Image: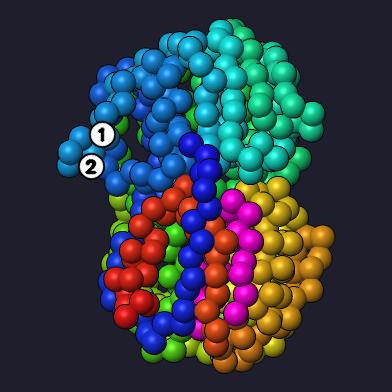
């Protein structure tokens, strides 16, 4: 699944961005819909699935462990599951490509099944630490053979019955939380995760939707999430909303390109995912929510964004869990604001597909933007709405969000910006450049 040949791409400033667009299905929900459908008994149908490389890696892994997964000509995915406890031993290593979510969540699934699975991935994924998932799953009885530093390639030897645990998350991580809950599905008794800082709650919503016995209780310690094991999941029909992480690129583009007026339809508005909207509105962005509604248990709305002058802010650290993936494009918004935007409390950015703090500081700095890097964030001094100088070639570091964020920056730059490799965009947003063209960027 790794890209062998880089695909450089040069992006020039856009005269204006106008139109109505849809964004791909939510990546987090797409992953989980495939995994839980594969553990249900019977036929589930998923509409609006994100068909990027990360999610396709999840589909391939679930097929390798026994699920029947087919994409119909109408774009609906049909899944016949094996039942909780029914995962089969895969014949070969599972290639996760660039997907940390797939890897960490599947480690949880495998941990409580009596199978042995090897996970491999591309160069970027192989640098990402898995120790934070290995620790709780080891307490449940699974055994691991990993590359030094808790990295891939990594072998998981699952156990059944696994041991239920009560685990307090040491870092705010929806992936670690989800891995433990998924392991708990096939573990006798009750498995509990205590979450001092709330993170995205797609796993809890979807597990309950599939019929798992799950409770979420607020407490002074944080959210206490308990799942009862040996569950019987019921098949579901799922409509995946548009990914707010993908919509974020257009929200920033619409804010910083003069004359822009863009409407994004069917965007997931789960409150654990909308930190970027809150931050942009604090900066003065003109974002209007239209036709708010509930689809498949998730809040959804259409978003209209129009060009507006932005002002620097100090990003509230409590927004971090709800916008951790959107910081790269927030830094781009900050590059066009009046004043110096400061973001702290986001050290998690250093262990994403790339070190996103250093990657964005170097990329924006190469384009003439004043940046100061912190261990847990960055300060970005903006142009007050003027175009940035641009004119640089950017090292995207196999990171789709670096590539897309710097594409947005190029839309209001005096000189073209070149991505050394645009191919990683396909991991989460295969039609990103097509959408940009639809909005008139390349006219």
Which residue appears at 62% of the width and 75% of the height? 392
Q: Which residue is mark 1?
A: 71
Q: Quadrant of the C terminus?
A: bottom left
Q: Inspect this view and state whether residue 297 appears.
A: no
How many neighbours does mark 1 have within 10 angstroms: few (below 14), some (14-19), or many (20 or more)? some
| Above or below, comparing residue 428 to residue 301 in the picture | above
Percent of width and height locating residue 171: 73, 44
Q: State which region is magenta.
A: 391-412
**Label 2 sits on residue:** 75
Image x and y of residue 118, in percent: 59, 20
Q: Residue at x 53, y 53 (%)?
A: 6
Question: Residue 417 appears in which quarter of the rendering?
Answer: bottom right
Q: Are marks 1 and 2 in contact (CB under 8 Å)?
A: yes
Residue at 54 percent of width and 20 percent of height: 93
- SS class of the residue under badge 1? strand
Q: Using the rendered view, name the quadrant where residue 374 is placed.
A: bottom right
Q: Position of residue 235 (x, y in %)?
A: 30, 26
Q: Please tell me whether residue 295 is drawn above or below residue 2 in the rendered image.
A: below
* Residue 366 within the magenta-colored segment of the rendering: no
CA distance for labels 1 and 2: 6 Å
Residue 276 rendering spot, x and y as whole percentages? 54, 66
């Amino acid at each position: 699944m790794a890209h062998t040949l880089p695909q450089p791409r040069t992006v020039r400033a856009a005269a204006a961005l106008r139109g109505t667009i849809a964004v791909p299905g939510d990546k987090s929900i797409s992953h989980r819909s495939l995994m839980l459908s594969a553990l249900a008994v019977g036929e589930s149908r998923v509409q609006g699935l994100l068909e990027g490389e990360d999610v396709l890696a999840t589909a391939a892994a679930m097929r390798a462990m026994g699920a029947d997964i087919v994409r119909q000509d109408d774009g609906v995915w049909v899944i016949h599951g094996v039942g909780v406890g029914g995962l089969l031993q895969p014949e070969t290593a599972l290639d996760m490509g660039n997907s940390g979510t797939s890897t960490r969540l599947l480690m949880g699934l495998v941990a409580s099944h009596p199978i042995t699975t090897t996970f491999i991935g591309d160069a970027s994924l192989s640098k990402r630490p898995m120790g934070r998932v290995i620790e709780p799953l080891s307490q449940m009885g699974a055994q691991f053979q990993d590359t030094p530093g808790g990295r891939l390639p990594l072998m998981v030897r699952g156990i059944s019955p696994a041991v239920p645990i009560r685990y307090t998350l040491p870092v705010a991580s929806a992936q670690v939380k989800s891995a433990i809950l998924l392991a708990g599905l096939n573990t006798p008794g009750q498995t509990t995760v205590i979450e001092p800082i709330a993170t995205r709650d797609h796993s809890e919503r979807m597990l309950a939707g599939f019929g798992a016995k799950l409770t979420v209780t607020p407490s002074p310690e944080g959210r206490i999430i308990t799942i009862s094991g040996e569950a019987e999941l019921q098949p579901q029909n799922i409509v995946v909303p548009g990914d707010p992480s993908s919509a974020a690129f257009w929200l920033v583009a619409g804010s910083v390109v003069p004359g822009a007026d863009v409407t994004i339809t069917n965007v997931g508005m789960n409150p654990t995912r909308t930190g970027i909207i809150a931050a942009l509105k604090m900066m003065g962005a003109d974002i209007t929510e239209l036709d708010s509604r509930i689809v498949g248990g998730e809040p959804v709305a259409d978003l209209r964004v129009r060009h507006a002058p932005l002002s620097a802010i100090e990003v509230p650290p409590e927004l971090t869990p709800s916008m951790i993936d959107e910081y790269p494009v927030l830094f781009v918004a900050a590059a066009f604001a009046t004043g110096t935007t400061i973001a702290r409390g986001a050290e998690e950015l250093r262990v994403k597909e790339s070190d996103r703090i250093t990657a964005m500081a170097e990329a924006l700095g190469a384009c003439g933007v004043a940046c100061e890097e912190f261990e847990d964030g960055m300060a970005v001094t903006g142009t007050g709405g003027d175009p940035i100088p641009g004119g640089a070639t950017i090292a995207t570091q196999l990171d789709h969000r670096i590539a897309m964020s710097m594409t947005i920056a190029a839309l209001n730059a005096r000189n073209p910006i070149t991505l050394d490799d645009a191919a990683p965009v396909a991991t989460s947003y295969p039609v990103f450049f097509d959408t940009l063209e639809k909005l008139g960027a390349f006219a």
